[in-house]
Image (tube, rainbow, N blue to C red):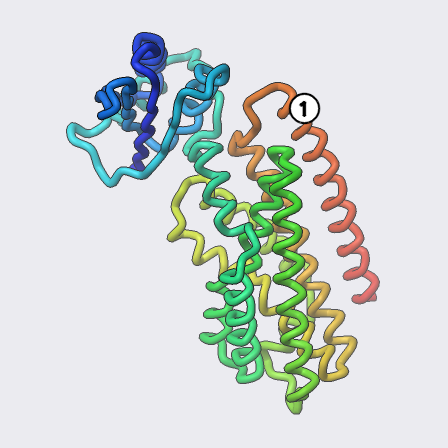
């Protein structure tokens, strides 16, 4: 099982209050903790070792405890193992035997909201490294599509520079975070514009003497593509909230964002407008489905703000965004229907 360590640095005067709070929730969360004095002589460090599934609930309790003061610091980091082991099996058996279990306040198996926010923010902020990643992955995708080489195209999929901003946008919608939403949209817009401009330029300079198989399949959108995008998007969000980044590689390949956009640019640059429209439709379907599935999965995982006024703001933002994405998806399906008939 994945483990986390929560380290809480507090003034010595707050020792009893923090210890009491941790002891109250220890039987339910099944963690171990201890306190160590720091070198300054005025502070203590409480270290809590727990299962990743309990991190969100414990972080919420600590945040409520310290909301009134700025004399604390909480740091979360992963732990490979602990001895003696945390008796998770015994805790699960106890929950099964309890006919009226206590309501779970957070998403089961999800990392804490703050840890999730930090992970998503790393892939959302616009930087020169992000711009370089977009350019390099676009070049890889262009070469793969022109050479009809699946292995090269998969390489562009795995780099997946457009996935992070979309996940950030879904999280920002769920939390009602306007700043994260703006950053995600800005980064996504820059990534899409760079990729499209580069691929359109390649199509204009090189042309398309032959429409390869990999290009052709990305000029069409079917209803199964929408289902695949929804399922892959939900799987990607679950992978992110579980804190298991290695599983995200498969999602990057399944949820193909970059190749349809590159195909759209290549077709447009070569003057094949009908095929460019088809590829653009597939790219739009993937973006819409990813965000719609992302918001729904974040909510199902119990990712919500802590305070009541932030929850109300997030609720309005989520409803508004869900309505927009649903209308766009309905319009997309309508376009697909008209194109077929």
Indicate the position of residue 31 as horizontal and vertical percent values.
29, 22
Q: Compared with residue 61, is residue 212 higher up or lower down, i.e. above or below?
A: below
| 134 horizontally vs 178: left or right | left
Most foreground residue, 96 or 54? 54
In the image, taking residue 264 as reference, residue 74 lies left or right, namely left
**Disc 1, SS:** helix
Identify which residue, 112 or 219, lies in the foreground.
Answer: 112
Q: Is residue 38 left or right of residue 173?
A: left
- Residue beneath the point at 22% across and 21% down: 37
Q: Residue furthest front?
A: 40
Query: Outermost residue, left direction?
Result: 84
Q: How many marks?
A: 1
The answer to which quarter of the image holds residue 13 is top left
Q: In this view, does 139 lie above or below 295?
A: below
For disc 1, the neighbor class at 10 Å (few under 14, some 14 to 19, many from 20) is: some
Q: Position of residue 213 (x, y in %)?
A: 59, 80
Q: In which quarter of the image is the N terminus?
A: top left
Left or right, 113 with reference to 8: right
The quarter of the image holding the C terminus is bottom right
User: Does any portion of residue 232 appear in the rendered image?
Assistant: no
From this view, report whether residue 189 is shown above or below residue 84: below
Give x and y (percent) for residue 218: 64, 71
Residue 175 visible in image: yes
**Residue carrying label 1:** 312
Q: Residue 72 location in percent, x, y?
A: 39, 22
Q: Residue at coordinates 53% horizontally, 84% vertically from top-left? A: 147
Q: Residue at x 45, y 57 (%)?
A: 250
303 relative to 258, above or below: above
């Amino acid at each position: 099982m994945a483990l986390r360590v929560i380290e809480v640095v507090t003034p010595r005067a707050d020792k009893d209050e923090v210890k009491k709070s941790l002891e109250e929730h220890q039987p339910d969360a099944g963690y171990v903790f201890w306190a160590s004095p720091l070198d300054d002589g005025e502070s203590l460090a409480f270290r809590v070792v727990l299962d990743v599934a309990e991190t969100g609930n414990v972080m919420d309790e600590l945040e409520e405890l310290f909301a009134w003061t700025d004399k604390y610091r909480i740091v979360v980091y992963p732990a490979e193992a602990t001895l003696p082991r945390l008796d998770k099996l015994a805790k699960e058996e106890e929950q099964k035997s309890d006919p009226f279990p206590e309501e779970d306040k957070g998403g089961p198996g999800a990392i804490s909201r703050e840890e999730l926010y930090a992970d998503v923010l790393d892939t959302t902020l616009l930087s020169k490294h992000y711009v370089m990643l977009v350019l390099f992955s676009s070049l890889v995708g262009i070469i793969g599509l022109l050479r009809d080489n699946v292995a090269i195209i998969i390489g562009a999929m795995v780099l997946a520079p457009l996935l992070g901003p979309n996940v950030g946008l879904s999280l920002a919608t769920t939390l009602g975070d306007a700043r994260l939403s703006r950053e995600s949209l800005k980064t996504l817009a820059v990534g899409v514009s760079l990729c499209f401009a580069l691929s359109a330029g390649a199509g204009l300079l090189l042309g398309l003497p032959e429409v390869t198989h990999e290009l052709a399949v990305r000029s069409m959108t079917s209803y199964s593509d929408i289902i695949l995008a929804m399922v892959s998007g939900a799987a990607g969000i679950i992978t992110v909230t579980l804190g298991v980044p290695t599983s995200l590689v498969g999602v990057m390949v399944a949820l193909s964002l970059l190749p349809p956009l590159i195909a759209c640019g290549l077709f447009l640059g070569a003057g094949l407008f009908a095929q460019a429209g088809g590829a653009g439709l597939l790219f739009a379907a993937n973006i819409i489905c990813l965000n719609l599935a992302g918001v729904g999965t974040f909510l199902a995982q119990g990712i919500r703000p802590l305070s009541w006024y932030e929850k109300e703001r997030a609720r309005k933002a989520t409803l508004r965004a869900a309505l927009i994405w649903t209308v766009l998806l309905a319009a997309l399906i309508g376009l697909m229907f008209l194109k077929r008939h």
